């Protein structure tokens, strides 16, 4: 006799959608709420801090692009 088997062992995992069944309208409300909250968070930061963050991200983006170009050139040479 074999031991007890799990009936759900072969089931595929599924995404939990939660209790919000309002569909697409509910998703739009959530994204607008997020946008409002992010705008409120930005308005609490000083202009100097925002400019500093922007320039840091801009410099980082430029470095990443340069690195990606170098890698592409190496790949082309191979």
Image (cartoon, grey):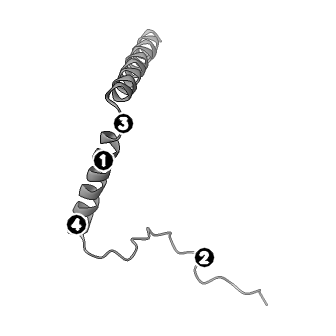
Q: Badge 2, how many Cα within 10 Å: few under 14, some, many 20+?
A: few
Q: Is residue 55 left or right of residue 27?
A: right
Residue at left 37%, top 17%? 62
Residue at left 43%, top 67%? 15
Which residue carries the number 2 mark? 9
Q: Is residue 55 left or right of residue 35?
A: right
The quarter of the displayed image where residue 73 is located? top left
At numbered mark 4, what does the secondary structure look like: helix, strand or loop? helix
Image coords of residue 18 (percent x, y) = 40, 73
Image coords of residue 45 (percent x, y) = 36, 36
Which residue carries the number 1 mark? 40
Residue at left 25%, top 74%? 22
**Which comes sooner in the sequence, label 3 or label 1?**
1
Tag nearer the camera, 2 or 3: 3
Which residue carries the number 4 mark? 24
- State the separation of the CA atoms marked 1 and 2: 47 Å
Q: Nearer the viewer, residue 8 or 26?
A: 26
Residue at left 50%, top 70%? 12
- Work out whether 2 lies above or below 13: below
Tag nearer the camera, 4 or 3: 3
- State the separation of the CA atoms marked 3 and 1: 9 Å
The quarter of the displayed image where residue 76 is located? top left
**Which comes sooner in the sequence, label 1 or label 2?**
2
Q: Nearer the viewer, residue 73 or 59?
A: 59
Which residue carries the number 3 mark? 45
The quarter of the displayed image where residue 65 is located? top left
């Amino acid at each position: 006799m074999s031991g007890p088997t799990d009936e759900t062992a072969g089931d595929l995992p599924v995404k939990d959608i939660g209790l919000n069944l309002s569909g697409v309208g509910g998703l739009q409300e959530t994204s607008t709420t997020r946008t409002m909250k992010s705008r409120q968070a930005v308005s609490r930061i000083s202009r100097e801090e925002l400019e500093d963050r922007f320039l840091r991200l801009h410099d980082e983006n430029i470095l990443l692009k340069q690195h990606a170009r170098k890698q592409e050139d190496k790949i082309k040479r191979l």
